Structures are given as structure tokens and as C-alpha cells.
Image: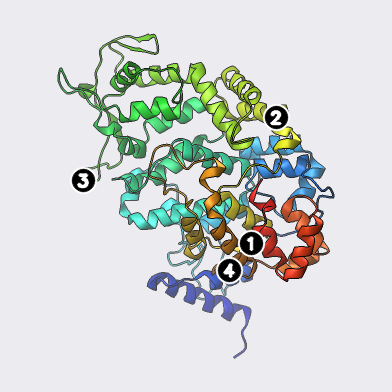
């Protein structure tokens, strides 16, 4: 029987639907069906690729390394023509960037190309469409948090992990995705705790992604009343029912120590107690009640007396407004500006951030009243960010390494378990960190992962990760040779030793991805 396009599509749809029902992996077949449908999971490349000509990282390569999760093969020429400043402004306004490929892959909005009268290939939007059913739990349902409880916890975590990887790999809104990861660590929530299993999905959507490049004040408030955060740091049981009741200090302590002032921010134990008093009465309905996941303020459980936080009097009788009053005090405090500036400079400049850059970034945060794009713009304008001495010296955390390798090779991937298992083994799978401080940033924490990094590089280059595929011969052809491809991957021309090692090994791409130079951004 001749395999026509229609038969391929119909057979592919049936096979994927069957795989979805019995739990079998559908990865390679799904990639094939996507190609036939014209719905690839990687953007098209230009016919020829232009690589950096220098032997050291230039400003374009440096910007791509720090503003993004790593350049794609065509990004260097595009950003060089556009200019680094213009590229940054594009990234700071993500809503204006065309991100249809990423959105289509996440939402799986594919159209049927089969015979319109055929019932074998489901029409767009119908139940059973295999390319629309991969992330049902992540679809925005108008903020109806309670519907998340209809899903098994493992399904939610798997979908959230896969969507996070795919967005980091595919999105044109790269700086936004980098900041999503930054704030996810800053406001870390472990989904394994209690009802966070269901509610972290809403936190990712309504807190982190909604405000990642907005205003820190709005982000902080959204986190404070996030159902997942109220569960994770016990805010839901912070109440004063009768005289003599002591507030639960868990969230108040982390709010001061991690989310705003920092451990050296100048607060005292009494400030922790007073902040906890301000936050009494906020709770969230559990899954045994109607309107599960709903956040509520109960005035009968609130300590409505006067408080003093960091020297500021909060008068009695404000009720729920105590929350906004205390958050306003914290956001305006110079300790918060410095703590956030230090963390941002550590993420974008160096593990030991230069003091001048921290001061400039903190000043911008204060002047802009917490506006995140203005703060980042000031950080990237510092001489310390652009200094040649910091280029290529920031050790990639495992997630960054894996995603940058996928982007450098223009990989197509479904981000299913064969891929995400590498992140688990590397110790950096999204949403798996147990403590409120989030995954560490410093290189010293991650340098024991090199063996698994090498294993990943070898498996990716040899197409041994099921559901993930690269076309190295096509990359070499478009680049005009392996040396140019090496320059695209490394962001500079390979050294003679790097070029010789790649040529002698017969596995040049794997060696590039495993090389010391690629481990740093």
C-alpha cells in the first residue's frame, strides 16, 4: 500500500491517540506528524548562518549569553544587525514579540489537514486531537483555581515541567523566560507540600508569569496572597482567635529574609513578629470545601491592633489593609532594593557581583519604584556588565546548560521524560527544590554535575534522546563547515586545540557541547 500524506496523517493520529491512552511514549511519531502538519517544534533557520569572527566573546555574543538561555544558530547575525541596545528593548517588551511558534506548541493549536469528511483525524478543538491534549491542565480557565484539583498531582507537575522547558527552548521572549526562572527561585514553592501539588500551577501562571517583567510591588503582593504560598509557608494558619494567641511566623520570616530585605537587611525578631501580626487572617480554602483554592480574609482571625514594622507605625483598625501597608514599607526600604540588586547582579554579571553595579541597580530600582524593566535596563548599562573580564565566566546551571544546548543545535523536542530525566539527574529539574531559598546560583554548587553534562551532550549530538532530534549535517551545511558551526556554538572562533580535538574525534558537536567553553555563558 502506498503511504500517502493522508494515510500518514491518519495513521499518525491513531498511533498517537493510542499511545496517549496506554501511556506509551509518542515522541518520535509526534515529531514526524508535526513535520507533515507543518507544525515544527523548532523555528526555521536561514539558508546560511553567520558566525562571530573574533577569538573572544564580543558584545553580541555576551548579550545573547546573558539575556537569553543561549543563542540559536541564526541569532548572532540577527542581533548584530539589530544592535544590542535595540535587542534589549525588544526583550524588555515581551508582549510585542511574535511568539506564535512557542504558543502553538504549548497550546497545540493545530488544524486538520485530513479529508474534511474523515472522522479518523479529529477536527481542531475536538476531544481526541492528540496534538491538543498534551497540556490540558495548563490552559487558562479564567483563574478558576479549583479546577486544578481535578488532575492528578503527577500530571500537573509533568505538564508544568515540560511547558517550562519548551518555553525556555522555543520562546522568542527569552529575557522574560530568564526572569520567570529568577522569580521562581526567589519565591520558591515546593509542589510536594500539601495542596501545593495542585496550586503551584496557578502560582506559576498568576504570580510569576503575570509579573515577571512588571513591577516588583505587584509581584510581591500576588505572591503574598498566592494560594500555593499560603500553603507552603503556612500563612493559611496564621491567625489570632483569642487574646494570647501567637502568630505563625513562617511566612513573615521568609518575606523579610528571602523576598525583600535579605538576611542582612536590618530587621529584628520583633519586626518578624509584627509583620506576622499584620498578616493574620489570610487563608485559603482546602480541597475538602466548596470553592477550593479560594483565598479569603477572615477579620475575626486578624490581629487588628497597632503594629510597628521597621520603625513605621501601622495604626489599629486597618483590617485586611495591613497587608498592603506592610508590603509598601518593605518595597520602599533600601534593604530590599539592595538585596534584589545583589541577586540580579549575581544572576547576570558574576557570582560575586561588583559593588558598583549593585549600587547602580539598587538606585534604579528605588527611582523606578520597583519597575523591573527599568531596574534591568540600569543593570545592563553598568560598565561591570559589559566588561570583557566577565564575558564567558558565568557557569551555567544545569537547566541553562541543557536548554542552551537544545537552542544551539536548533533541536526539536517534546520535552518528555527522556529529556527531563537528564535535568532530574543533574539536580535541576524545575519545581523540585524543597526549601524556600530556591535553587542555588553559585557555580560551586553545580560543578559536581560535569559527568552528566557530558553524557547529555553525547546523547543529544548522537540523537539518542527519544523525543528530541537534531540535524547536525544540516547545521554544518548551513554554517558552511564545522569550524563556523563551532563558532556559532561557542560564540567565538574555536581555538586551534578545540578545532583539532573536534576534527580528530569524529564527534565534534558532542565535544563542543561538552567543552569547558560551552559550560560558561
What residue sits right under mark 1 in the picture? 411
Q: Quadrant of the C terminus?
A: top right
What residue sits right under mark 3 in the picture? 288
| Viewer-nearest of discs 3 and 2 | 2
Residue 79 placement, left or right of 320: right
Q: Disc 3 or 2, which lies upstream in sequence? A: 3
Calculate the distance from the C-alpha at mark 3 to the C-alpha at mark 2: 53 Å
Closer to us: 350 or 137: 350
- Few, some or many C-alpha atoms within 10 Å of disc 3 (few <14, some 14-19, many ≥20)? few
Q: Are marks 4 and 1 in contact (CB under 8 Å)?
A: no
Q: Disc 3 or 1, which lies upstream in sequence? A: 3
Closer to us: 465 or 87: 465
Label annotation for residue 31: 4
Element marked by disc 3? loop
The x, y position of residue 437, in whole percent, is 43, 37
Identify the residue at image location x=41%, y=41%: 203
Calculate the distance from the C-alpha at mark 3 to the C-alpha at mark 1: 44 Å
Q: Disc 4 or 3, which lies upstream in sequence? A: 4
What residue sits right under mark 2 in the picture? 384
- Few, some or many C-alpha atoms within 10 Å of disc 1 (few <14, some 14-19, many ≥20)? many
Q: Disc 4 or 1, which lies upstream in sequence? A: 4
- Few, some or many C-alpha atoms within 10 Å of disc 4 (few <14, some 14-19, many ≥20)? many
The x, y position of residue 361, in whole percent, is 62, 24
Figure label count = 4
Amino acid at each position: 500500500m502506498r503511504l500517502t500524506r493522508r494515510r500518514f496523517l491518519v495513521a499518525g493520529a491513531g498511533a498517537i491517540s493510542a499511545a496517549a491512552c496506554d501511556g506509551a511514549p509518542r515522541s518520535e511519531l509526534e515529531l514526524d506528524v508535526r513535520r507533515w502538519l507543518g507544525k515544527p517544534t523548532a523555528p526555521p533557520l536561514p539558508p546560511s548562518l553567520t558566525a562571530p569572527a573574533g577569538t573572544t566573546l564580543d558584545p553580541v555574543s555576551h548579550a545573547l549569553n546573558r539575556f537569553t538561555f543561549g543563542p540559536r544558530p541564526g541569532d548572532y547575525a540577527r542581533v548584530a544587525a539589530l544592535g544590542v541596545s535595540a535587542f534589549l528593548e525588544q526583550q524588555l517588551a515581551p508582549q510585542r514579540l511574535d511568539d506564535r511558534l512557542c504558543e502553538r506548541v504549548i497550546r497545540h493549536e493545530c488544524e486538520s489537514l485530513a479529508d474534511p469528511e474523515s472522522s479518523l483525524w479529529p477536527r481542531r478543538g475536538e476531544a481526541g486531537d492528540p496534538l491538543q491534549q498534551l497540556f490540558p491542565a495548563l490552559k487558562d480557565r479564567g483563574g478558576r483555581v479549583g479546577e486544578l484539583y481535578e488532575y492528578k498531582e503527577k500530571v500537573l507537575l509533568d505538564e508544568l515541567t515540560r511547558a517550562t522547558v519548551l518555553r525556555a527552548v522555543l520562546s522568542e521572549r527569552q529575557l522574560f523566560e530568564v526572569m520567570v526562572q529568577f522569580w521562581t527561585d526567589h519565591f520558591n514553592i515546593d509542589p510536594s507540600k500539601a495542596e501545593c501539588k495542585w496550586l503551584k500551577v496557578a502560582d506559576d501562571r498568576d504570580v510569576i508569569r503575570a509579573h515577571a517583567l512588571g513591577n516588583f510591588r505587584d509581584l510581591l503582593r500576588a505572591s503574598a496572597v498566592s494560594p500555593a504560598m499560603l500553603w507552603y509557608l503556612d500563612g493559611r494558619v496564621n491567625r489570632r482567635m483569642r487574646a494570647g494567641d501567637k502568630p505563625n511566623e513562617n511566612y513573615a520570616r521568609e518575606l523579610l529574609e528571602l523576598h525583600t530585605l535579605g538576611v542582612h537587611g536590618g530587621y529584628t525578631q520583633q519586626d518578624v513578629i509584627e509583620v506576622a501580626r499584620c498578616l493574620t487572617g489570610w487563608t485559603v480554602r482546602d480541597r475538602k470545601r466548596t470553592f477550593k483554592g479560594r483565598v479569603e480574609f477572615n477579620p475575626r482571625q486578624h490581629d487588628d491592633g497597632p503594629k510597628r514594622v521597621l520603625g513605621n507605625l501601622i495604626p489599629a483598625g486597618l483590617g485586611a489593609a495591613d497587608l498592603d501597608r506592610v508590603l509598601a514599607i518593605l518595597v520602599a526600604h533600601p534593604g530590599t532594593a539592595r538585596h534584589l540588586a545583589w541577586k540580579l547582579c549575581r544572576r547576570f554579571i558574576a557570582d560575586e557581583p561588583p559593588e558598583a553595579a549593585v549600587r547602580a541597580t539598587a538606585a534604579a530600582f528605588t527611582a523606578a519604584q520597583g519597575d523591573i524593566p527599568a531596574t534591568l535596563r540600569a543593570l545592563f548599562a553598568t560598565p561591570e556588565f559589559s566588561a570583557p573580564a566577565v564575558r564567558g565566566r558565568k557557569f551555567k546551571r544545569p537547566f541553562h546548560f541543557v536548554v542552551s544546548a537544545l537552542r544551539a543545535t536548533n533541536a526539536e523536542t517534546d520535552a518528555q521524560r527522556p529529556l527531563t530525566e537528564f535535568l532530574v539527574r543533574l539536580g535541576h529539574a524545575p519545581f523540585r527544590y524543597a526549601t524556600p531559598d530556591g535553587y542555588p546560583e553559585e557555580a560551586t554548587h553545580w560543578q559536581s554535575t560535569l559527568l552528566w553534562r557530558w553524557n547529555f551532550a553525547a546523547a543529544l549530538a548522537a540523537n539518542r534522546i527519544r523525543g528530541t532530534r537534531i540535524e547536525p549535517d544540516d547545521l554544518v551545511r548551513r554554517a558552511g563547515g564545522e569550524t563556523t558551526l563551532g563558532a556559532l556554538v561557542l560564540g567565538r572562533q574555536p581555538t586551534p586545540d578545540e578545532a583539532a580535538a573536534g576534527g580528530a574525534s569524529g564527534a565534534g558537536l558532542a565535544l563542543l557541547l561538552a567543552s569547558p567553553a560551552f559550560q560558561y555563558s
